[in-house]
């Protein structure tokens, strides 16, 4: 069975080791190539997580010399492979979003319209830069060698498509929000002066979402 005291970062690292032995540095580099976009905590834990796996016998470690320096290289064990397989067979948690820009939108009525619109522009620019990153990943996977994980090409394509669409949605939404707020005289009075427009947006959102929500399974 999956080990309950491990988190997705641990399983992420085990997954990296199924195809090749990797040093702590290589693991950290791979996490920084976009994996932290789907699991932000991986970025904070990428150096300590392999040590936890070592203590549990899910990986082994050996020291190798690279010039005058030494590095620790990790290998997955049979127990590590079993733990990863067991975890993959369990039900995942619902998606959670950690998005500072959206917190700033929610609290925007305490600031100025300039602050709000600058934040929206920043959100859009961040999203466009992330799109460029995943477009580069897609181009790398099209190379003859298939990129970093050619044996995982077919599943990485699925994830890459999601990330591209995700950041495209943020960029498009930010442009839409900039259009909506262009005539706001401030961040407070539109609660009343633009109420009819706000209601129309909500009604449109409900109409667009109803079909999908009605077809979703009931969690109650």
Image (cartoon, helix red, strand yellow):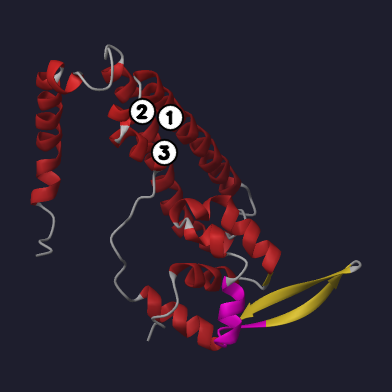
Q: Earlier in the sequence, mark 2 or mark 3?
A: 3
Classify residue 122 as left or right of residue 200.
Answer: right
According to the image, label 3 marks what residue?
A: 167
What is the C-alpha distance between the residues marked 2 and 3? 11 Å
Q: Earlier in the sequence, mark 1 or mark 3?
A: 1
**What count of labels does the image hold?**
3
For the residue pair 1 and 135, the one nearer the viewer reads as 1
Visible residue check, residue 154:
no
Which of the 4 image quarters holds residue 118?
Answer: top left
Q: Is residue 43 above or below residue 161?
A: below
Badge 1 marks a residue whose secondary structure is: helix
Residue sticking out furthest to the right: 68
Q: Which residues are magenta?
A: 49-60
Classify residue 48 as left or right of residue 189.
Answer: right
Q: Is residue 135 above or below residue 156?
A: above
Local crowd size for mark 3, using a 10 Å CA cut-off: few (<14), some (14–19), many (≥20): many
Q: Residue at x 34, y 76 (%)?
A: 89
Q: Residue at x 13, y 31 (%)?
A: 202
For the residue pair 195 and 177, the one nearer the viewer reads as 195
Q: Residue at x 91, y 68 (%)?
A: 68
For the residue pair 180 and 168, the one nearer the viewer reads as 180
Residue sticking out furthest to the front: 110
Badge 3 marks a residue whose secondary structure is: helix
Can you give x and y, in whole percent of width and height, for residue 191 in the image? 16, 23
| Quadrant assignment for the C terminus | bottom left
Q: Is residue 131 above or below residue 54?
A: above
Q: Is residue 102 above or below residue 19?
A: above
Badge 2 marks a residue whose secondary structure is: helix
Per the rendering, the mark at residue 124 is: 1
What is the C-alpha distance between the residues marked 1 and 3? 9 Å
Discs 1/3, front: 1
């Amino acid at each position: 069975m999956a080990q309950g005291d491990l988190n997705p970062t641990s399983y992420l690292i085990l997954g990296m080791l199924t195809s090749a032995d990797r040093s702590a540095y290589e693991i950290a580099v791979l996490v920084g190539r976009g994996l932290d976009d789907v699991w932000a905590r991986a970025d904070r834990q990428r150096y300590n997580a392999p040590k936890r796996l070592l203590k549990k016998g899910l990986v082994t470690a050996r020291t190798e010399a690279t010039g005058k320096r030494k590095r620790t290289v990790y290998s997955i064990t049979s127990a590590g492979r079993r733990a990863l397989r067991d975890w993959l067979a369990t039900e995942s948690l619902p998606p959670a979003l950690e998005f500072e820009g959206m917190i700033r939108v929610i609290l925007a009525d305490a600031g100025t319209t300039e602050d709000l619109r600058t934040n929206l522009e920043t959100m859009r620019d961040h999203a466009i830069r992330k799109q460029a990153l995943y477009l580069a990943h897609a181009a790398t996977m099209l190379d003859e060698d298939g990129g970093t994980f050619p044996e995982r090409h077919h599943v990485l394509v699925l994830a890459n498509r999601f990330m591209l669409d995700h950041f495209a949605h943020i960029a498009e939404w930010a442009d839409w929000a900039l259009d909506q707020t262009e005539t706001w005289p401030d961040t407070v009075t539109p609660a009343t002066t633009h109420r009819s427009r706000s209601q129309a947006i909500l009604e449109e959102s409900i109409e667009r979402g109803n079909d999908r929500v009605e077809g979703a399974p009931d969690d109650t």
